Image (spheres, grey):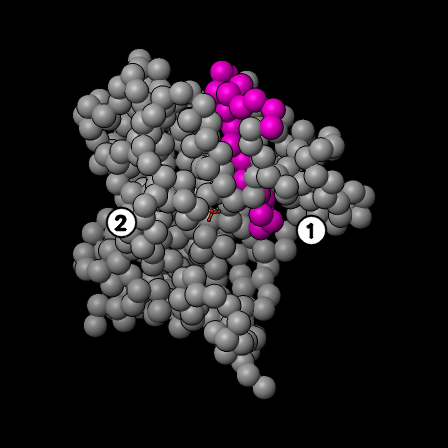
Amino acid sequence: MSTLTERWQASLMNNYGTPPLALVRGQGAEVWDADGRRYLDLVGGIAVNALGHAHPAVVEAVTKQLTTLGHTSNLYITEPPVALAERLLELAGAPGRVLFCNSGAEANETAFKLARRTGRPKVIACENAFHGRTMGALALTGQPPKREPFEPLVPGVVHVPYGDVAALEAAVDDTTAAVFLEPILGEAGAVTPPADYLAAARRITAERGALLVLDEVQTGIGRTGAWFAFQRAGIVPDVVTLAKGLGGGLPIGACIGFGAAGELFQPGQHGTTFGGNPVSCAAGLAVLATIEDEGLLEQVNLVGKTIANGVEELGHPLVTGVDGAGLLIGIVLGKPVSAAVATAAREGGILVNNAVPERVRLVPPLVLSEAQAREFLTALPGFLEAADG
Ligand code: PMP
């Protein structure tokens, strides 16, 4: 009998390379492998499992929806996408309209097409930002190694340095349709921009009639300790894209257009078969209700601070800083050894992410407890020693 890993290698097309671990079960912020070994999951499906694995609220909502009415196509109206759109707009605190799709990349494709509807040719995005791997989203992505194998990409995108207000001032003009920004760079390892950056981007885009599109695929739905990261900056963008945590593990994406931005598509101009399917939307409603019922925004702030302060207090020579917000945490390393830290952590029973060499990223389920945070802090010095040795 071949192992699950061997079967994976023989049957699946390469995407991220062969993963080092085969998992069979999950509960909350914990997962188990086939040998029954338990891991603390600080990756959470890459910021996906807002409520952790097998949360009863999601299980119940999905089961109830699947046994009542499954997918129906967008040719008919159903309750869950309407209720989810209403709730998202309520939480955002601004009127608008929502288009549902299936992933973060697709949500950004939607926003890109929305931007094209302004009739202006230029779109601005940031160096180092990540917006997805479909051709339009990849054109927005500012990471050359991910872009170059697939060129030519969708034209019209200009990249500027992230966090640089002067660069935005210089780039945005009356031919600019939209500026795409991540409120915190997620894939780049939880890189926080200067405090005034989003407010400056809001002012600059408003002055010049360009849309401000915030990619909250990673930062949205409680991840930073607020429903949306834009609320922490005290602004309202024109467009927000969501995915990941919104579905509590089920695939979903959303593009919200606030005010006039929600009116740019004409009927028939954009859509997708599974967008707004009742099952994913029922999961989304369960996620939002549970974040509220369980006080998870407060918990994210508390547990996030426990980790950030705890890492700083370690005073380990390999750690040069802690970045991010809430439970989107980047542990900044003085050497490019995040892969070695992640390997040592995995061997020690804790899953962390090493998307960039100089940062260890934590994006655990929002239900992560204080006790689980302390478990990580207690074990971390050993992982750093192993990587630094
Ligand atoms: N935008 C951001 C900010 C992301 O972090 C990601 C995924 N890491 C995406 C877009 C793409 O989302 P998906 O993988 O669901 O297409």
- Position of 64 compared to 266: left or right? right
Q: Which residue is mark 1?
A: 59
Query: Quadrant location of the N terminus?
Result: bottom right
- Position of 39 compared to 356: left or right? right
For image coordinates 26% across by 40% down, the residue present is: 127
254 inside magenta stretch: yes
For image coordinates 68% across by 35% down, the residue present is: 74
> Residue 328, image x and y in percent?
39, 45
Please report contact status of discs 2 and 1: CB closer than 8 Å, yes or no.
Answer: no
For image coordinates 49% across by 55% down, the residue present is: 45
Nearest to the observer: residue 233 or residue 279? 279
- Between disc 2 and disc 1, the foreground one is 2
Please tell me whether mark 2 sits on a helix, a strand or a loop: helix
Distance CA(mark 2)–CA(mark 1): 40 Å
Numbered range of the magenta stretch: 245-268
> Residue 241, image x and y in percent?
47, 34
> Residue 298, image x and y in percent?
49, 37
Where on the picture, by quarter, is residue 210? top left
Q: Which residue is mark 2?
A: 144
Nearest to the observer: residue 58 or residue 368? 58
- Position of 332 compared to 370: left or right? left
Q: Is residue 40 above or below residue 113?
A: below
> Residue 230, image x and y in percent?
41, 28
Could you tell me the amino acid type at mark 2?
Pro
Residue 291 can be seen in this image: no
Q: How many residues crowd mark 1 within 10 Å: few (<14), some (14–19), many (20+)?
A: some
For image coordinates 25% across by 52% down, the residue present is: 332
